[in-house]
Structures are given as C-alpha cells and as structure tokens.
Amino acid sequence: MTSSRLTQEVQRIFANDGVIARLVSGYSCRPQQQQMASAVSEAIWDGQNLVVEAGTGVGKTYAYLVPALLSGKQVIVSTGSKNLQEQLFFKDLPALQQMLDIKLKVALLKGRSNYLCQRNMERQLSGADVMDSQVLDDLLRINQWAGQTIDGDIGGINTVSENSAALPLVVSSKETCIGKACEHYEACFTRKARQKAMDAKIIVVNHHLFFADSILKETGFAELLPDTDAVIFDEAHLLPDIAVTYFGQQLSIKSLLNLIEQFANLYRQSMADSPQIAAMTARCLTQLEQWQSLMVATEQVDWRYLLSNRELMAVSWGLLEELTAYKNMLLGYLGRNEEFDDCVEKLDAYLSKLAVFFQCDNHNSAYSVEYGYRHIVLRISPINVAKECEALFRADTSWIFTSATLQINRDLGLFTKALGLTAAKTLILDSPFDYGRQALFCVPRHLGSVSQHNNATKQLVDVAIKAINAAKGRTFMLFTSHRMLNQVAQALHGRVQYPLLVQGQAGKQTLLKKYRQLGNAVLLGTGAFWEGVDVRGKLLSCVIIDKLPFMSPDDTLYKARAEGVLREGNDPFMSLSLPQAVITLNQGVGRLIRDEKDRGVLILCDNRIVNRPYGQAFINSLPPMQRTRDLGNAIRFLEHID
C-alpha cells in the first residue's frame, strides 16, 4: 500500500456512504474529520510529524484510529487520562475492528503500579500477625481475587475499596522489583503485560507511562514499550507539563523511608548476626523522620527560599552525612544477599538525588517541595524541555499530536516550541458545531474586581443562583481554587432547590454518575473537572467559571521559568501565564457543547476578559459563541432550553 492508497481508503471509510455511515447510527460525514484522517494517514505512512488541534465534535478519535489500523504498522496511542485509555481499548478499537473487518493484536499497558505483584502479596501475608485487621481483611480479599485474575490489573478488583491501604502494599513497584531473581518471574503480571505489548500492532498507554519508559530506555534499563513506527498522543496539551516531570528529578521521602525499613526487615530475616545494621537503620529512620517534620513545619514550597535558613541547612546536610555513612557501612555486607545488594544500589541512587537537590546549583531548574499526606516529595523541574523532547522524538518514527486545545490566537507555535518540534506539519480544525446558534457566552456587567475576594464570592453566588434556577439545575461550576469552591458551596446551601454535588464528597467518576442519574444537579469542581468530562444533552445547560485560570505567580516552577524568560528579554506574563490560562479556559469551556443538538450558556464572572488588552487572546481562542454582557439575556436563553 502507498500513502495515497491509504489516504483514499480512509476517505472512503469516512464518506457519507462509507462503512462507518452504514454501521453507526446518527453518523454524519464531517469534512474536518476527513481532513484530519487524511493528514494522519500521510504522517504515519511517510514518517512525518503532525500537530492537529481538532475542536469538539470533529471526531478525532476515529480520525486517528482508522489510519492506524489500516496502515498495518505498529503504533502506540498515548492518552492523558485513564478513562480515555480504557475507552479506546474496550470500546473504540473493538468497534472499529469489527466495522472494518480487521483482526489485529491490540494491547492495553498501564504503569506497573496498576498490576498485582505476587512477591509483594506473599511477603505481606507472611507478616499478617502484626497487621491492622482491616488491612488484613482486604489483603485476604485481594489474595482470593489473585487466584482468579488473568491479567493482574487491580482495576478489576471490586471487593476492595480503591482507597484501601492494602493496595499500595501489593502492587508492583520499581523499588521492590528484583526482576529475573524473583521466584514469580514467569507468572509476573507486569512482565506478561509488557510481553503482550511487544507483540501487539496497536498499543494503548498513557502519557506518564510513555515518558517513564522513554527515560528508562535512555538509561539502558529494560524496555516496557517497543520502538514503534508511529506514536499518536491524544490530549496532547498535557505533554509539556508531563515532560517537565519526567525530564526533571523527584525523590519521595516515603520511598526513602520504605527502603530503609526494608533494610530493617532484611536484618531481622537473614542478617541478625550484624547488629550494626539494626542500630544505624534505627538512627537513620529517626533522623529522616525528624528532618521531614522540620520541613513540614516550614510549609515552604520553594527550596531556594529555604537556603537562607541556617538551622535547616545544618540539619539537612547533617542528614545527608548520616545517610552516606549508613550507605558506606552497608557496602561492607555486599554479596551476602541478592535483595540486600539491590537495596544498597537503590539507596545510593536516592542519596545522589538528595545531594543534587540540597546543592540547588542549576539556575535552569526549579527546586520545589511538595507536601502530600504524611510525606513530602522533592522535585527538580527543568524550565525548558525542548532539547530533551527533540532528542526523544526520533526521526525514524512518526509523531502525531492532537487535542481540542493547543492553539493560542490561532497559532500552534507555542506548543511546538515547548516540545522542540522544529519540523512538524500543523493543522487547526474548527468544531463542526454551530456555536453561534447553540451557545451564548456571558460576562455579566457591573462585576467587581476578582482580587476583592469577599465581594467576588458574593457576586459569583448571586449570579449562580439566578443561572441555576433558570437552567433548572443542570449546571457545572468550575473554580480556580478549592477555597472559592468551598465558600460558594457553603453559600449556595439552602439557597437553591437543586442537589449540590461538591468535589471531595466522593470520587470524580462517582460524582459524575450521580450527576447524570439526578438529571437536575449542580456540580462544583476544580481542575479535575475542567477536562476529560463528557456530559451530553440537556443534562448540562450551563457552565459557570469563577475567573480566568491564571497560574499562581508564587508557583515554584513558574517563578523559575519566569526568571529564565526575563533573562532572554521577554515578558513572562505573555510567554507563560497567558498561554497557560487560554488553554485551561478552553478546556473548561469545552464541557458545555458536546453534541450538535446541545444548547447552553457559558458565564464567566471575570471582566478582565473584556476590559484588559490581553482579553482578546482568550476571545480569539474560544469557539464563536454569541456574546452578551447582559445576564438577563443569558437567563432567558437558559429558560428556553427544554
């Protein structure tokens, strides 16, 4: 098959009388979808790079899956969310294979923490006599499931809560994996999943796994994924931030504590004749816990800011000195136990990371402290990953990037520059929806400044009550902060007659399921609900956004990036803040119209979009909705949605 023949075949499939039109109820031929499918076909066959913004309703999933299936080449499809990953594997790919009468091996590969580790399971059960009763009960349920599962994917467990404390104890991890030395190596679920991926034509992964695997390849470790002919990234707008995570460094203090505790277990199990190990292990655990408590007390996320704290620096370097002496002592026991040797190697790697973080001598990186539940994570994030990405995106592979939100002011240049894509065809395909008829965008008059918090909360609540009543519930309220979300949720309680579903009351999917079931609910959410949410029809008539989603100027990575932009003589606001906010706002707006029959109102309670010069960049990037400053017009529009 040639490139032109592949393109012609794809065009026939998407035509008005094509196979999809014949077999999919309600399908209509969309020129944008055909154009995208042709561009993807050419990119896969000719080894090109392609960047496509495909507006809501284009049908981008089929537009890249059909060429991938027909090409006969090995293709990785990477997504930004677990939901889309599973939709592709369990729904879209089987449906298309049946329609096109194609039988190809397809694999779904998740990160190792999604798979049960038989060795970890065995070790946890051996220590059951000192375990919390609830954890033990869950472990026994997991063990029962383990005897029945085929793939070991813990997502298939329905007898244990997804938040169970037992699950992290028994899943696969880099820290506990001993590879071929494991007695369960042949039966290992993670190894089997990798092997299945190697043999498949279409491999569905997520962005985190893709980057993690790519970094492993660079360091010479075992590969999870094959080097394929093409890689397609859906939800590609997430890639720049994910790339920063993987091309940087991070050290979880919990992982370091767990590793040191592993030495304590090894001492009790097989090295009891070496009391020095027990003594120094206990001392290091205590010192590390104390240092972490000291860090938590500062609540400072910017490590550079803490460098002037002499007391903390003395304790920090003292900790590193103690841990280094500990490692040197452990080196004297190498060769007695294979698992012990592996742990010493991991400790050495952790201490190298800790030393690099403490030194804080790279001005092109941000050094930040992330405060999680009970434990902290130290992160070094590069402010620019273009060179690293350019090396990653090899010339012998087709790289295809698509999302509904990539452009700023009708330009994809910022996205391609961020990923070092110097040679890529770019394409912007607008949504086929009739936004001028289907949607109204309202920025109410007489709004006060969003920086006056108390007043902003009151005016948001006043607007929301009117809109919610007019929409008969059926509303999403999207917030830029948890603080504002909680205050508005409290203020709305008792003032609207419709059910309020608030982020934090339950998991994201549980809340969405309840929203759909109720039919007249109001859902209040932050970042997690701005994207990857698809509610069609009359169930969602109104989206209210509290303010333009600019990132915090106090964010450690933002500050480091801003300094770098200033050194180049450019404006951090225009180069960093504004593009990020435009993309994020577009994601939120994208929740409103999901189907050609949908109608709805978007209300933004931030007048900066109309009275600041930069507001035009937002407006230029939004769908071409009707616009009004009169809240009354928006209310009437909502009242006529039946």
Image: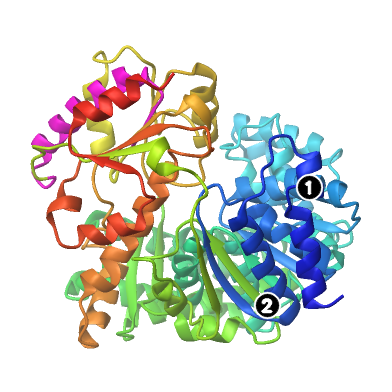
- Residue 253 at x, y = what percent? 45, 62
Q: In the rendered structure, which segment of residues is drawn in magenta? A: 450-477
User: Disc 1 or 2, which lies upstream in sequence?
Assistant: 1
- Which dot, 1 or 2, sits closer to the camera? 1
Residue placed at 20% from the left, 86% from the top?
569
Res. 559 visible in picture: yes
2 part of magenta stretch: no
Spatial CA distance of label 1 from label 2 is: 30 Å
Location of the C terminus (image quadrant): top left
Q: Is residue 74 visible?
A: no
In the rendering, at what x and y percent does residue 186 appear?
A: 89, 61
210 left or right of 291 in image: right
Residue under label 2: 398
Quadrant containing the N terminus is bottom right
Q: Which residue is mark 1?
A: 17
Q: Which residue is found at the position 67% from the left and 33% from the top?
A: 138
Q: Main secondary structure of the magenta part?
A: helix
Question: What SS does tag 1 mark?
Answer: loop
The image shows residue 265, relative to residue 3, as above or below, that is above
Callout 1–callout 2 Cβ contact below 8 Å? no
Q: Secondary structure at mark 2?
A: strand
Residue 470 location in percent, x, y? 30, 19
Residue at the location (69% across, 44% down)? 127
Name the kind of residue labelled 2 in the image: Ser
Q: Quadrant of residue 345?
A: bottom right
- Relative to residue 279, is residue 293 drawn left or right? left
- Note whether 438 is above or below 356 in the view shown: above
Q: Amino acid at mark 1?
A: Asp
